[in-house]
Image (cartoon, rainbow, N blue to C red):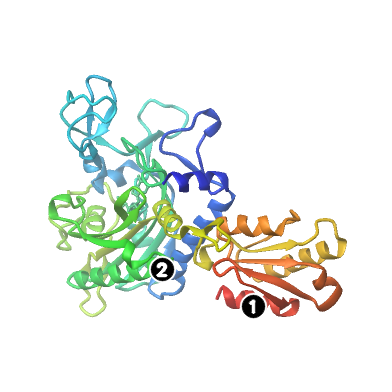
């Protein structure tokens, strides 16, 4: 973990937030390469969930959330972690994270009894902060999908089964944020709520588990690094009938990367007015505040159904950490030296191609390199970097370390002789000459 954290800071992937003021616990900023990696991961998810399927719609809802939403979702009452105080050093801990009942800070056993601590952040709405008008920062993106269910159905004429996908920020006032970007207070989620007919939910649940495992493999996560955890009944979230956690071997241990839950009709039922008419889940409390019926009409029977929901919910930040960890390797070279490589899958690489002139000040070489950069950039594959440091060997090493799959070097042969460039592959370190007119097709094929 230390090596990764150091590389992330040194190369501009991830910085501690508010660093110049000593940081702010549980918050990180994504730097020039981190933002590209994160965006690429989110795009891959969106492509797989929305573009490649014909049964999912997208959504981008507000972060500030009406407290009633989080009352009826059950979060006000149950979204808590058990908090203990150390009476000796006054530090605070999550009771279920203590290994042996002693304070990790001073070793004292004199701890208070655990008490529930609600993880939601509140903020005042409007100019008067007297507590009468507030909103929550959403603790999951899912709730806005449920409260928009009718809007999406009415505007798209969707029938079951179908899903609504959303990527966005979520906030949790974690008692002990830790392990770099693994457990933070502000993070992003990629969530799909997939609505199905009751009775077909278990089959869809199994199907989504497999779909998600396959997707992580496509992002370069080896199936050997993943395990499925069938969450036991006493650990299930208040809305879940069954959950499979996709566990990844993070640098600090085997932990949850994504949760895939069968949320039943709990949420749509909870947010529905006149509930009881639709045979909804027993856990749901009566809702006099909603003005909507979050149900869908079955065209065959004309009956109203509150759909069941299968929810694959992945953390973007945990995904970034998993991908960095999986891609990181230090290789011994034949000449006894070492090179550090981030062997990202090409579609995730923050920089797709680095174009480098051999000579910094050679007009012809520089102009050619610039025009190649423009031409490759126009392919729309992601960031193509023109880099003029004049030291090609160092450039290759640096680009290995940030995971750039291809480096293109423009030299004298390019401009004086045959209009070819050197193309150097990150993984094999092989160099080959490719003619400039063939380069766009070569690069396109590489990233296909
Ligand atoms: N809507 C369901 C839901 O929020 P969750 O298991 O609490 O379920 C889903 O969260 C995912 O969000 C987790 O699998 C994890 O990847 C990510 N996540 C949750 N809390 C996080 C935190 N404090 N820091 C970073 N990621 C977090």
Q: Position of residue 386 (x, y in %)?
A: 71, 59
Q: Return the residue at label 2.
A: 49
Mark 1 CB in 8 Å range of ligand 1? no
* Alpha carbon distance from label 2 to label 1: 28 Å
- The residue carrying mark 1 is 442
Q: x and y percent of residue 24 in the render?
A: 45, 33
User: Would you call the spot at circle 2 few (<14 residues within 10 Å), some (14-19), or many (20 or more)?
Assistant: many
Query: In percent of the image, x 29 and y 52: which residue is there?
Result: 255
Give how far across and how far down residue 41 sits, in percent. 47, 61
Q: Secondary structure at mark 1?
A: helix
Dot 2 falls on a residue whose secondary structure is helix
Left or right, residue 109 beside residue 435: left
Note whether residue 430 is visible. Answer: yes
Q: Is residue 37 above or below residue 287?
A: below
Image location of residue 421, percent across then percent down: 74, 72
Q: Is residue 396 left or right of residue 100?
A: right
- Which quadrant holds the C terminus? bottom right
């Amino acid at each position: 973990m230390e090596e990764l954290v150091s590389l992330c800071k040194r190369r501009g992937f991830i910085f501690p937030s508010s660093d110049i003021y000593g940081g702010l616990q549980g918050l990180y900023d994504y730097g020039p390469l981190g933002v590209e990696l994160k965006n690429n991961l989110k795009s891959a998810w969106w492509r797989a969930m929305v573009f490649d399927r014909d049964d999912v719609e997208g959504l981008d809802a507000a972060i500030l959330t009406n407290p009633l939403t989080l009352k009826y979702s059950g979060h006000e009452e149950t979204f808590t972690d058990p908090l203990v105080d150390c009476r000796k050093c006054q530090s605070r801990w999550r009771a279920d994270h203590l290994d042996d009942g002693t304070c990790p800070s001073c070793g004292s056993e004199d701890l208070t009894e655990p008490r529930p601590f609600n993880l939601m952040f509140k903020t005042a709405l409007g100019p008067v902060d007297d507590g009468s008008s507030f909103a929550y920062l959403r603790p999951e993106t899912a709730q806005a999908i449920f409260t928009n269910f009718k809007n999406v159905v009415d505007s798209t004429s969707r029938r079951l089964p179908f899903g609504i996908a959303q990527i966005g920020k979520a906030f949790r006032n974690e008692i002990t944020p830790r392990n770099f970007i693994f457990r933070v207070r502000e993070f992003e989620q990629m969530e799909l709520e997939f609505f199905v007919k009751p009775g077909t939910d278990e089959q869809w649940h199994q199907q989504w588990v497999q779909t998600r495992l396959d997707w992580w493999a496509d992002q370069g996560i080896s199936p050997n690094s993943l395990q499925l955890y069938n969450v036991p009944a006493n650990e299930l979230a208040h809305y879940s009938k069954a959950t499979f956690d996709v566990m990844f071997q993070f640098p600090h241990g085997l932990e949850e990367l994504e949760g895939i839950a069968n949320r039943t009709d709990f949420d749509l039922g909870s947010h529905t007015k006149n509930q009881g008419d639709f045979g909804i889940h027993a856990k749901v409390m009566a809702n006099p505040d909603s003005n909507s019926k979050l149900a869908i009409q079955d065209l065959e029977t004309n009956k109203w159904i509150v759909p069941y929901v299968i929810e694959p919910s992945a953390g973007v930040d945990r995904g970034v950490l998993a991908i960095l960890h999986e891609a990181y390797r230090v290789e011994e070279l034949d000449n006894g030296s070492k090179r550090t490589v981030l062997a990202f899958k090409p579609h995730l690489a923050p920089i797709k191609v680095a174009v480098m002139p051999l000579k910094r000040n050679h007009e012809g070489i520089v102009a050619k390199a610039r025009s190649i950069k423009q031409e490759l950039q126009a392919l729309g594959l992601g960031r193509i970097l023109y880099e003029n440091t004049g030291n090609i060997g160092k450039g290759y090493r640096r680009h290995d370390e940030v995971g750039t799959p291809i480096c293109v070097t423009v030299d004298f042969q390019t401009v004086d002789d045959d209009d070819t460039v050197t193309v150097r592959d990150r993984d094999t370190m092989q160099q080959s000459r490719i003619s400039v007119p063939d380069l766009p097709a070569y690069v396109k094929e590489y990233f296909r």
